[in-house]
Image (cartoon, grey):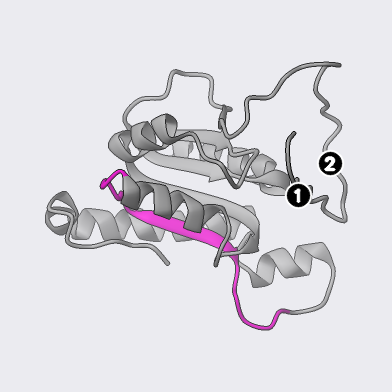
Amino acid sequence: FQGPVYLRFGARGGEDEFLEKHQEVALGQFEPLTQQEFQKADVTIIALGQLVGPGMEVAAELEKRGYRTFVFNARFVKPLDREMVARIAQESRLVVTLEEHSRVGGLGDNLLRVFQEIRNIPPLLKLGAPSNFGFSGERGFLLRKCGLEVSLIVKRVMEEMENLERHKDFFKRGLLSCER
């Protein structure tokens, strides 16, 4: 890489998955984690770091409830693949970002910025840490407090999908956004 690079490692450590030696990763490109080709999704989950695994669990639960769900491993906060972001905006009823980071200035905000630049802003649910003073405790406790446990994420997504259904005429005309 030319220039500064920021690496973040969670206290828990990573899963036992590593890239093959010398495998290249395209800078800024999302990694699709869902088996089928990405197209017309009820929910598109874009997860980062330690929340990729829980993102897959959330997707499995949403699929059981009848929602077509796709999951991407963001791998990068920026730059973002504008072409893929444009496809996600076009093909998704709801976009959900999952990150162990402040909701302010992280993946969700960068994604929203690109949505604004391409002038196509889908309903966006940014899930991460609040920007106020935090809590101290074990990882599980902190995830619960931030609403980042699988069951809590599923609950929030279900609430947003119900909200979208109730107000679908407004969302079709682009009058509302559920960014939170």
Q: Which residue position is annotated with label 1?
A: 6
Residue span colored magenta: 118-134
Position of residue 141 measured from the top left corner of the image (x, y, whole percent): 76, 69
Q: Quadrant of residue 65?
A: top left
Q: Against 166, is 54 above or below?
A: above
Residue at the far front: name it.
2
- Please tell me whether residue 36 belongs to the stretch shown in magenta: no
Q: Under tag 1, what secondary structure? A: loop
Amino acid found under the numbered disc labelled 1: Tyr
Tags 1 and 2 in contact by the CB under 8 Å rule? no
Quarter of the C terminus within the rendering: bottom left
Position of residue 98 measured from the top left corner of the image (x, y, whole percent): 58, 52
Regarding residue 67, the answer to whether it shows in the image is: no
Regarding residue 95, the answer to whether it shows in the image is: yes
Residue beneath the point at 79% across and 51% down: 8
Amino acid found under the numbered disc labelled 2: Gly
Q: Under tag 2, what secondary structure? A: loop
Q: If you read the primary sequence from the N terminus, does the residue marked by circle 1 or circle 2 appear first? A: 1
Q: Quadrant of residue 16?
A: top right
Q: Which residue position is annotated with label 2?
A: 14
Q: Main secondary structure of the magenta part?
A: loop
Q: Against 80, is 26 above or below?
A: above
